[in-house]
């Protein structure tokens, strides 16, 4: 936390070293989050790219009041939501129901993906976006329900409800997958 | 059946790694964006240079910024050799201030933002203070030529106009954060030998100087100043409290602009149209103190104001309530109108620039055709700019007797002392009284009364079964947006709170930390652990807190009869 504050301060003073360290520190975390939200590798990479570029543009006036990881996760969430909505407008359909693993070009990474995780990614893409967002932001983004509720403009209980419904749906999808 | 915890673990195990191509693309664009931003003045060689240098475009961008960096570092090195004089130069530079725009912090939170303008002699001409953060809920204070306008946002929606003279310390809040004052104080402390200052050797890429001031007179305070070596002005001051090694950030001031011309519109009142105006400029308000002591004046002002309210003499009540118009009396004082004799307690002094007292009263009011005994706490204060006059402020607090109906519950006041209804904070719908009630809903009340008050529930369930109002079992839960009820045989057997809308009288509620709860209620609780949350049950209090398994905050509070 303190390290992040220092890094942000250094970025404000123009340190590219600090900016690179922030990128290295959070790139995988944010990509995982974005991919969990969007399912599409290319879209997720675009989101992470846009978040860091925007951050670099505003860092001169940026005041870190909470945790940097939560801030960046919130940015990813906002951009991912925009992308998901744009896709809905474009195709009239939610996130494509296809295993995210198929879009991974890197054979090494494909090998790492376990079957279980592949099923999870498939299931994730099938639950409503709002639920997926809470589940991902809480479990992968490490955000508190209170923070997520603020981000979504909802009460903590509604947010938590979405989390529970999301997990229930995931469980049901994974169990039905397991029975096949 | 796969357990939920298993899925949570799986999601936590999800891991993606960026490719080298992505790193190259992002780093290139990020560094270009940084170089293009105004703040990019000094750059260092990035640690992931090898990756970046794969891109020809990035190579050029990095080469350009390195040239700038080298030129700037030479310039700065020259400046840094004169660091022994830096602070004296800073003191001098700060004395020439004509305006500033600062942001203050208190314990890691943004506190307020000030814009202030000064004349050639350094006297304050006008200022604007915006307290709190967020686009909607903030308190705004404008001051110019001895007139202060304060806007209290909803749920108050009040604009208070007063005379506030800067010579009597009325603007001490501004002084406390004024960077010039801070610098002068530090200068004096160092000159008196009560503090020592160290100039930190800057890292090569740091343009600004950092000065550390440590007290040698026993005060557990360390101040860190950041100074722009080009202008010699302080751009940030942070205070850390505590003994060496245990210091924590306490408050800070960040200078956003210095000596920049400001938009005059910043200092003009521009409040929402439906704002209630309390004018203490053009009319005499409150009650004359005469020969009374401050305590006597506080009690007498309140007595007269409540008497005027009781007889519905709104002209008199408005004057005693600080010039409150009828709309404000209806909005804030209507519910406190006495329907019986008033018992007024001893006034409690509150430290402030002008004297302020809190006075607790006990009397009956009529609500929904019923007579209730209440004990509100009123704030009575001296009128600013009208010496010797006192008025009753519109913000009223609740005391515990209001909500804890059985008299033997007073022991709980040890834990839950008083709810302060903060005029800047959000609306609190009601108080959680352990073992008794939540807001207007008491244990034992009928489900029909709950429905009458709250309307249709969001859902009704018991176990995995869902029900409707036409098809109710003996035992079930009725869930509303921020509160739920456990019903047994048609009566409320337990009440659950899911949002911060309801709070204990000490201000705690949903969203607060486990630590806050155990500090307030002690360690005598029973724990039940589940996959997602832990249940802390205080049987003697009739309270159960549902604590989130990971972030350790209160998700829900359940009130039941104490054991």
Image: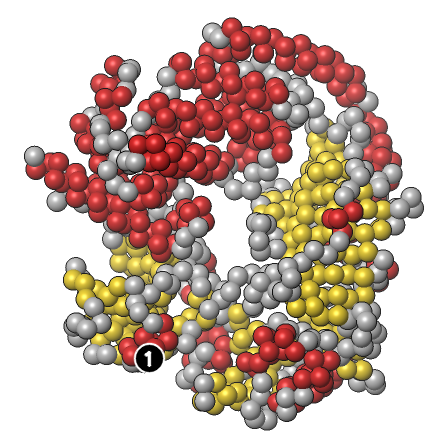
Left-right relation of B255 to B547: right
Q: Nearer the viewer, residue A103 or A84?
A: A84
Q: Position of residue B150 (x, y in %)?
A: 71, 61
Q: Position of residue B456 (x, y in %)?
A: 31, 69
Q: Position of residue B441 (x, y in %)?
A: 37, 76
Relative to B109, does residue B468 appear above or below in the rendering?
below
Relative to A59, does residue B510 appear above or below in the rendering?
below
Q: Nearer the viewer, residue B86 or A115?
A: A115
Question: Which residue sits furthest bottom?
Answer: B341
- Residue at position x 17%, y 72% from top? B471
- Residue at position x 54%, y 80% from top? B335
Assess disc 1: are there few (<14), some (14-19) or many (≥20) residues with their C-alpha within 10 Å of its C-alpha.
few
- Residue at position x 26%, y 49% from top? A165
Q: Look at the numbered disc 1 and give the secondary structure of its residue.
A: helix
Q: In the rendered image, which residue does mark 1 sit on?
A: B449
Relative to A100, does residue B553 appear above or below in the rendering?
below
Q: Position of residue A83 (x, y in %)?
A: 39, 32
Identify the chain of the residue marked 1, using the numbered disc in the image: B
């Amino acid at each position: 936390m303190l390290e992040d504050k220092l890094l942000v301060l250094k970025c404000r003073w123009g340190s590219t070293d600090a900016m690179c360290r922030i990128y290295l520190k959070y790139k995988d975390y944010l990509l995982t989050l974005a991919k969990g939200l969007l399912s599409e590798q290319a879209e997720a990479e675009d989101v992470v790219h846009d978040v860091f570029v925007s951050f670099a543009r505003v860092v001169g006036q940026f005041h870190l009041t909470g945790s940097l990881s939560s801030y960046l996760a919130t940015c990813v969430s906002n951009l991912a939501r925009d992308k998901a909505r744009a896709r809905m407008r474009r195709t009239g359909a939610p996130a494509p129901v296809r295993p995210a693993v198929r879009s991974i070009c890197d054979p090494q990474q494909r090998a790492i993906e376990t079957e279980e995780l592949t099923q999870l990614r498939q299931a994730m893409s099938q639950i409503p976006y709002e639920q997926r967002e809470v589940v991902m932001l809480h479990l992968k983004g490490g955000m508190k329900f209170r923070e997520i509720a603020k981000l979504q403009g909802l009460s903590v209980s509604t947010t938590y409800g979405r989390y529970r419904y999301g997990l229930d749906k995931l469980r049901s999808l994974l169990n039905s997958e397991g029975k096949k | 059946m796969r357990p939920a915890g298993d899925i949570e673990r799986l999601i936590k195990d999800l891991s993606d790694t960026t490719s080298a191509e992505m790193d190259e693309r992002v780093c290139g664009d990020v560094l270009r964006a940084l170089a293009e931003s105004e703040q990019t003045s000094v750059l260092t060689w990035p640690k992931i240079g090898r990756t970046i240098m794969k891109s020809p475009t990035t190579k050029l961008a990095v080469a350009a910024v390195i040239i700038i960096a080298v030129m700037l570092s030479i310039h700065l090195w020259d400046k840094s050799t004169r660091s022994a004089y830096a602070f004296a130069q800073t003191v001098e530079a700060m004395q020439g201030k004509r305006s500033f725009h600062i942001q203050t912090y208190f314990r890691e939170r943004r506190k307020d933002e000030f814009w202030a303008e000064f004349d050639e002699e350094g006297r304050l001409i006008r200022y604007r203070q915006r307290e709190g953060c967020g686009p909607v809920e903030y308190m705004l204070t404008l001051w110019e030529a001895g007139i202060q306008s304060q806007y209290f946002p909803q749920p108050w929606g009040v604009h208070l106009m007063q005379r506030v003279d800067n010579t009597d310390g009325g603007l001490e809040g501004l002084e406390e954060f004024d960077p010039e004052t801070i610098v002068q104080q530090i200068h004096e402390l160092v000159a008196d030998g009560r503090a020592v200052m160290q100039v930190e050797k800057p890292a090569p890429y740091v343009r600004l100087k950092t000065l550390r001031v440590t007290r040698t007179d026993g005060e557990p305070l360390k101040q860190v100043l950041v100074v722009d070596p080009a202008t010699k002005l302080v751009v940030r001051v942070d205070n850390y409290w505590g003994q060496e090694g245990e210091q924590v950030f306490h408050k800070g001031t960040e200078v956003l602009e210095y000596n920049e011309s400001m938009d005059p519109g910043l200092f003009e009142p521009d409040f929402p149209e439906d704002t209630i105006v309390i004018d203490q400029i053009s009319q005499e308000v409150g009650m004359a103190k005469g020969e009374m002591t401050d305590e006597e004046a506080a009690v007498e002002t309140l007595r007269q104001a409540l008497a005027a309210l009781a007889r519905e003499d709104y002209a008199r009540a408005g004057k005693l309530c600080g010039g409150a118009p009828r709309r404000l009396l209806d909005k804030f004082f209507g519910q406190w109108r006495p329907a019986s004799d008033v018992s007024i307690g001893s006034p409690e002094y509150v430290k402030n620039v002008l004297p302020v007292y809190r006075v607790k009263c006990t009397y009956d009011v009529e609500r929904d055709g019923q007579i209730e005994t209440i004990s509100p706490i009123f704030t009575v204060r001296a009128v600013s700019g009208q010496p010797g006059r006192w008025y009753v402020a519109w913000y009223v607090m609740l005391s515990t007797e209001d909500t804890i109906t059985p008299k033997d519950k007073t022991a709980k006041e040890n834990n839950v002392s008083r709810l302060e209804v903060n005029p800047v904070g959000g609306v609190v719908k009601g108080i959680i009284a352990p073992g008794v009630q939540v807001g207007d809903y008491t244990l034992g009340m009928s489900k029909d009364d709950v429905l009458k008050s709250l309307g249709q529930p969001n859902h009704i369930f018991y176990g995995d079964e869902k029900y409707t109002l036409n098809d109710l079992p003996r035992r079930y839960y009725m869930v509303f947006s921020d509160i739920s009820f456990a019903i047994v045989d048609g009566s409320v057997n337990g009440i659950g709170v899911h949002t911060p809308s309801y709070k204990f009288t000490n201000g705690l509620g949903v969203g607060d930390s486990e630590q806050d709860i155990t500090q307030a209620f002690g360690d005598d609780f029973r724990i039940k652990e589940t996959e997602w949350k832990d249940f802390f049950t205080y049987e003697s209090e009739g309270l159960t807190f549902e604590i989130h398994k990971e972030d350790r905050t209160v998700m829900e509070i359940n009130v039941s009869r104490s054991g």
